[in-house]
Image (cartoon, helix red, strand yellow):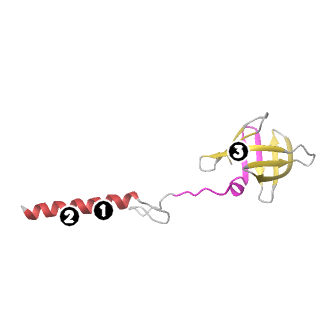
Amino acid sequence: MLLKKGVVIVTMVLGAGLALGACGDREGQTKKDNTPVDTWSPLADQDALVGRWVDGSFTLRLDRGGHYTFDAGGQATSGSWTLAHGRLYMSPPKGNDEVWDFTFGDQQNTLDMSRKGGRAYHYTRS
């Protein structure tokens, strides 16, 4: 009877250790079936904004060099962009700079942009 209790206790301790180990998957580790653990680390805003973004017929392209192109169903404009104070500043060549508030969603695959008194956009990375 004592031996059986000892086995049960050992089994419970080992089982608890396995359960605790399974809860702590970290980057670079693999699951029991040897598939990589899915991890995601957000990019800095400056890097995450770079790419092609689509909202219906509106397309916004932001490149790493600070150039943007905005196409509104065939009518395109372009200029330079920069980040400052957590906002996106877009400067078309003819002036009238625009200041945009933005937030990311879905692991930086969606981008919501709005400006005071202006239209809001809900972009998806494409």
Query: Which residue is drawn at the image coordinates 55% and 57% (left, top)?
Result: 40
Q: Is residue 25 magenta?
A: no
Disc assigned to residue 10: 2
Q: Residue at x 36, y 62 (%)?
A: 21
Task: Give the mark nearest the N terminus, 2 or 3.
Answer: 2
* Residue 17 tag number: 1
Question: The residue under label 1 is which amino acid type?
Answer: Gly
Picture coordinates of residue 89, whole percent (x, y):
80, 48
User: Which residue is at 74% across, 51% downward?
Assistant: 85
Q: Is residue 56 magenta?
A: yes
Using the image, determine if residue 29 lies above or below residue 81. Answer: below
Q: Are marks 2 and 3 in contact (CB under 8 Å)?
A: no
Alpha-carbon neighbours of circle 3 within 10 Å: few (<14), some, or many (≥20)? some
Q: Which residue, as the protein is rendered here, is positioned at the far right? A: 94
Report whether 25 appears left or right of 119. Answer: left
Asked whether 126 or 39 is in front, the reply is: 39
Element at label 3: strand
Q: Residues under labels 1 and 3: Cα distance?
A: 44 Å
- Farthest left residue? 1
Q: Can you tell which mark lies on residue 102?
A: 3
Whole-angstrom CA distance, mark 2 to mark 3, is: 54 Å
Res. 97 image quadrant? top right
Judged left or right of residue 56, residue 16 is left
Of the residues shown, which amino acid type is indicated by label 2?
Val
Residue 90 position, x and y percent, is 82, 48
In this picture, is 63 found above or below 121?
below
Per the image, label 1 sits on a secondary structure element best described as helix
The answer to which of marks 1 and 3 sits earlier in the sequence is 1
Of the numbered discs 1 and 2, the one sitting upstream in the chain is: 2
* Range of magenta residues: 39-60
Residue 43, relative to residue 110: is it above or below?
below
Q: Quadrant of the N terminus?
A: bottom left
